[in-house]
Image: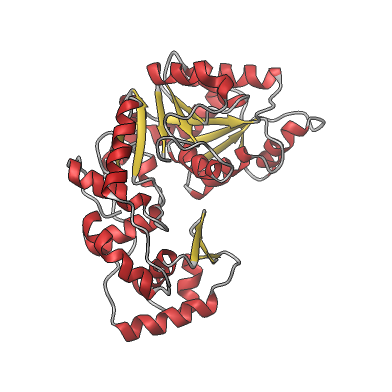
Amino acid sequence: MPTAPRPLNPAEKLDWLRLIRTENVGPVTFYQLLARFGSAAAALDGLPEIARRGGRDRPLTLFSKAAAEREFGALDRAGARLVAWGEPGYPPTLAAIDDAPPLLSIRGDPQVLQRPAIAVVGARNASANGRRFARDMALQLGQRGLVVVSGLARGIDAAAHEGAMPTGTVAILAGGIDSVYPEENRELHEGIAERGALVAEMPVGTVPQARHFPRRNRIISGCALGVLVVEAALRLGSLITARFALEQGREVFAVPGSPLDPRCRGTNDLIRRGAALTETAEDIVAQIEVQLAPAAARRRDAATASEGPELAPAGDGEVAAARHRVLERLSPTPVPVDALIRECQLTPALTLNVLLELELAGRLERQPGNLVALL
């Protein structure tokens, strides 16, 4: 990811905010634009032309400077601040994933985000035993020096936050940093802000919608060395977090349960598919122990890691031919980018250039797992 491991100055951070909030720009596209143009300011200038080449028939809406300044003001009033990828306060484990948020709103103690963490997630309609297990497990993990990350939902998430409150917990929010959801967790929300950290990718004032939760889940797994699932029905959101964990190279742990309880079918299925059967905190610590020793080195490396080919400009004729070849092989069915590059027999840089143009034109959608599909 092409960015210097240093604090951004106010003007640079304003440009980063404008770029990531601009229409059709997601995290992957953001980093590709930085690689291509060298700065967010230059990328903002070049966006309209790229979108036009991708086939966009109306002007691209850029996030205005005034709107960005209003968001900074709202963050200040909420008691939060923006931290950019590559800055010292950014969660180091999260920085290593392909689609790490370029900017995070953080409220609370930023130091808790620098410590090794385990995510604990599960059913919202959890049983009393499930909630007690999650609370006790979080406490035990905290006593072993691990921060507990979760999503502040009712049920298992809330129990995990409660158990880890004395030792360190991080809540990843689906909405804005000022959005309390569900309302019943308001006291817990404020407690985490005082004794741990709240983290949000979405703008201040965003009320969480269904589409926001998968984006939130990739951050939960991305912040952690592994994900523990406690009670989850089949096709529950917690299983999405587990899938992200696998894609990100994280460990997946699952608590076994009764086959007669629908809330345990998802966790039992995870174990059947290779997740580590987990009954105690020691089961987790033993599995990640090898990752804890070099964690400091990985945190340093994350800030300077460079990933993927540079998006060098190509001639108009070459790009037009590549665009035709890529469009022939794309459809509404998602396809891995790596497979598309092989199928098109184009260079990675040229293929990524075409995908960038199509996405900015509103003709392409990126999906988790480095998948793309036509809209």
Describe residue 207's horizontal placement relative to residue 36 as left or right: right
- In-front residue for pair 259/99: 99
Q: Is residue 219 visible?
A: yes
Vertical placement of residue 164 versus 238, above or below? above
Q: Residue furthest right?
A: 260
Position of 98 compared to 366: left or right? left
Q: Position of residue 318 (x, y in %)?
A: 34, 84
- Compared with 55, 275 (above or below) is above
Expressed as whole percent of the image width and height from the top left, the position of residue 38 reads: 21, 59
Quadrant, the C terminus: bottom right
Tell me which residue sits at (77%, 33%) in the image. Answer: 262
Residue 302: give x, y in percent of width and height: 30, 44
For residue 302, say whether it is visible. no
Most foreground residue, 314 or 260: 314
**Residue 54 against residue 41 in the figure, above or below:** below
Looking at the picture, tell me which residue is in the foreground, 85 or 202: 202
Where residue 294 appears, as percent x and y from the top left, is: 33, 36
Q: Residue furthest top?
A: 166
